Image (tube, rainbow, N blue to C red):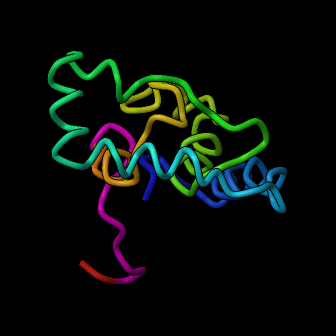
Amino acid sequence: KPKRWNKWIGHDIANAALDKVGAAYDNWLIGIQAFCGTLVGRFLSWLTLSTIEKIDINGKDKWICSELVAYALGSQPKYKNKGILINPFNTITPQELFEDKKLFIAWKKEGSK
């Protein structure tokens, strides 16, 4: 869960994402992210010192899952420009996002130790 999460922050994060409900899925962006994970994509990333992975090729009013989560989190002052959110939201992969220890802690069930 996001660090320092509470129900009010959760509400604000959900409201930020709610504004984008019904937006188109960014097939182009997901394709580019998938390409960056291939052998050729990784080689190009190495050649360009990872610059290729940070190219901003965002479809206008189109989103992918991790981009929308990053947008919603980044809309909150507690998370803005923290950890991976210093990067353009459309360049953040799901793995990078949810493995970010500056943003997330393990979610524990209420009442569990």
Left or right: residue 90 compared with residue 75: left
Quadrant of residue 86 within the rendered picture: top left
Looking at the picture, tell me which residue is in the foreground, 40 or 100: 40
Height in image: 24 above or below 83?
below
Quadrant of residue 113 within the rendered picture: bottom left
Looking at the picture, tell me which residue is in the foreground, 43 or 100: 43
**Magenta region, main secondary structure:** loop
Height in image: 87 above or below 71?
above
Quadrant of residue 75 within the rendered picture: top right
| Residue 105: percent from left, percent from top | 32, 54
| Residue 53: percent from left, percent from top | 35, 29
Magenta stretch: includes residue 92: no
Looking at the picture, tell me which residue is in the foreground, 3 or 71: 71
| Residue 11: percent from left, percent from top | 72, 57
Left or right: residue 2 compared with residue 19: left
Identity of the residue drawn at 26% across and 48% down: 37
Label total for image = 0
Left or right: residue 113 compared with residue 15: left
Identity of the residue drawn at 57% across and 51% down: 69
Identity of the residue drawn at 60% across and 54% down: 27
The span picked out in magenta is 101-111
Identity of the residue drawn at 38% across and 80% down: 109
| Residue 10: percent from left, percent from top | 64, 57
Looking at the picture, tell me which residue is in the foreground, 16 or 33: 33
Q: Kindly give the residue lying farthest to the front in the view shown.
A: 40
Left or right: residue 49 compared with residue 87: left
Screen quadrant of the N terminus: bottom left
